[in-house]
Structures are given as C-alpha cells and as structure tokens.
Image (cartoon, rainbow, N blue to C red):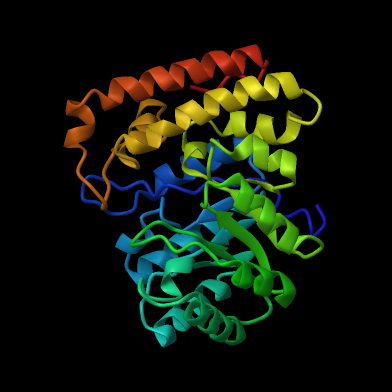
C-alpha cells in the first residue's frame, strides 16, 4: 500500500478482553487480533472506546497499545487513541506518549477538545494547540466518540484538518449522509480519510467516496464489512442485500455493548469471560438480549455462505 491507501478499508474498533478480576487478558487479546486479521481487515483501531479506554489507567493504556503493535508486527497498520484527559497539558502528554509507541496515527477524541457548552471556535483553538505540540513524525486523526458526550466536528475543523496535512483519519459518527458528502468535499485531494462508523449509511457513503468503515459491528462479522468495502462496485445488487443485513444487524449495538460482543467472542473461543469495566452483564442475560444477538450472528453466517466467504475456524 502507498501512504495514501493506508487509511482505507475496514478498521475494527478493538475490544479489550478482561479476566474475572477485570485485568487485561493478554492471551485472549492475541486470539482477537488474529481473528480480525484472518477476516481480512485493513487496519486496527486500538485503545478506543470499545477498548474501554476511559476505564484504563494511563499505564494500562500505553501497555495495551504497545502490546497490540508488537503482536500485530506489521501485518496491518494500527492507530490508537487513549485520549481521555480533560486538561490540555495532560492531553498533550497522553497523546505524546501514544505517539512514541510507534502507531501509524494518534487519534484524538473530539469531545476532549472543548466542554459541552463551549463553542466550535474553542474546540478548533485547542485542536491547533494539540496539533502543534504532538510530533509531526506521526499522523493524527479524530474520533467523534459519543462518551462522555458527543461533539460532532464543524466544517471549519474538518477543513482545517484537511489543510494542515497532519490528519489522516476521521472516525465519522454523524450518521448523516449529507454531512458525510460535505466532509468528503472538504477533504478531497488531502491525506484525510473518512471512515464511517454507521452501518445504516455505510453503502451510501462508500458510493459517495468515503474511505471505509470503523465501527463496533466489526466485532461480530468483519468479513462482511470487508466484502462490502471491496465488492460493492462490481456486485452492486449483492451489495444492497449485504448492506440491508448489516444495517439491521447494527441495531445489536444497543443490546448491552460491549457485553454482547464479548459474549460472542466467548462463544467462539476467543475470550474466557464477558467481564467489562463499563457495565455488569446481568441485564444482557435476563432480557432476551443474548438470544437476539445469537440469531443475528446465525443469519450473518448464512449470508457469508451465500457469498462464498471462507468458513470461520470455529
């Protein structure tokens, strides 16, 4: 791949497996990484919200990022965040340490740039300060993370990032095709890539020129997202069917994620537990959520067979 292609394709937002004591389960993490790569993904987004980064210590955050990089060993590019602090100086320190790990790009969290009541002008000013402070030896990106609150990027911020030549990656959570098209126009000709996190608008965004997908459902069926990304131009009718399934399946995110995804990985032998630092698992097992997710997964397996994708190892 040349540098301009590095940020295209399907980029799973990585889970963090924990043991019964809610300590990181490194052996299970190895299995997860191999599972993603076997599915044909184009890169990995480590140390993100799905990784429960807001519930990791700074030492764990760095250890997790380094572990992923070491185990991936160049098989695919890796980006990482770990951007959880509130104070600007602490944020710069966090991001600088992540940059030192050797990731392809350091991903900023948009809601760290300003408090909920502060303006987009404040967010842009803070973004500019952070950008100037982080080494230019690493790419930068932004994730419109919904926790602890959701701050969508203004057109001015997207345009500044594109013109800066520092930014490579936006994990877009606007869920609005008109906004995505506007962002694509603002970033055209730059090194800034738009990765849609929303399954419902994914196919339309790819048709409009978006560069890929980076969302939670890669933790269930990454092969289908890889197929859609790679095949929609020459198999458009099948692509609509796959897109319709992925759009509907994406509703599973509301069923106690990340517990639902961790339960799936327990079922296929990747994880030993569903332990999470973000929530307890009781509601998932008492509210018919598990059976719903299992049905979603089974239907996805049928679709994989129809597309003649290789059978999973489990």
Question: For the point 71% across and 77% down, which residue is it?
Answer: 164
Q: Is residue 234 visible?
A: yes
The quarter holding residue 231 reads: top right
Report x, y in % for residue 180: 63, 51
* Residue occupying the point 44% across, 22% down: 297
Q: Please, which residue is most extreme toward the front here?
A: 178
Return the residue nearer the eye: 203 or 284.
203
Find residue 71 and report its horizontal and vertical position in percent. 55, 52
Residue closest to the eye, 70 or 37? 37
Which quadrant of the structure image shows residue 88? Answer: bottom left
The x, y position of residue 269, in whole percent, is: 40, 29
> Residue placed at 47% from the left, 66% from the top?
109
Residue 9 placed where, x, y %? 68, 44
Please indicate whether residue 191 sits to the left or right of residue 171 in the image.
right
Rendered view: 179 above or below 82: above
Left or right: residue 182 compared with residue 79: right
Q: Is residue 70 visible?
A: no
Counting labels gives 0
The residue that appears at 52% across and 17% down in the rendered structure is 301
Is the residue 306 above or below the residue 164 in the image? above
């Amino acid at each position: 791949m040349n540098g301009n292609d590095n940020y295209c394709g399907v980029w799973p937002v990585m889970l963090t497996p924990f043991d019964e004591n809610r300590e990181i389960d490194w052996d299970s993490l190895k299995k997860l990484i191999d599972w993603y790569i076997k599915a044909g993904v184009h890169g990995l987004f480590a140390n993100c919200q799905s990784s429960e980064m807001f519930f990791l210590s700074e030492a764990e955050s760095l250890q997790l990022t380094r572990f992923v990089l070491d185990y991936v060993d160049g098989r695919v590019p890796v980006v990482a965040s770990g951007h959880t602090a509130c104070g600007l100086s602490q944020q710069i320190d966090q991001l600088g340490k992540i940059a030192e790990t050797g990731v392809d790009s350091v991903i900023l969290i948009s809601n760290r740039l300003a408090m909920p009541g502060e303006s987009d002008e404040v967010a842009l000013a803070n973004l500019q300060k952070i950008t100037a402070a982080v080494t230019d030896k690493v790419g930068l990106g932004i994730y419109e993370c919904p926790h602890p609150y959701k701050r969508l990027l203004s057109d001015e911020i997207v345009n500044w990032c594109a013109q800066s030549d520092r930014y490579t990656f936006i994990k877009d959570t606007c869920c609005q095709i008109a906004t995505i098209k506007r962002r694509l126009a603002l970033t055209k000709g730059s090194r800034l890539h738009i990765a849609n996190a929303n399954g419902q608008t994914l196919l339309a965004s790819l048709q409009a020129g978006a560069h890929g997908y980076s969302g939670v459902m890669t933790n269930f069926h990454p092969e289908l997202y890889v197929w859609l990304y790679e095949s929609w131009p020459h198999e458009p009718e099948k692509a609509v069917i796959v897109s319709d399934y992925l759009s509907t399946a994406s509703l599973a995110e509301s069923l106690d994620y990340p517990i639902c995804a961790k339960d799936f990985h327990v079922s296929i032998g990747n994880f030993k537990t569903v332990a999470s630092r973000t929530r307890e698992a009781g509601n998932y097992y008492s509210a018919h959520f598990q059976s719903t997710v299992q049905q979603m997964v089974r239907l996805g397996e049928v679709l994989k067979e129809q597309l003649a994708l290789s059978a999973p190892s489990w």
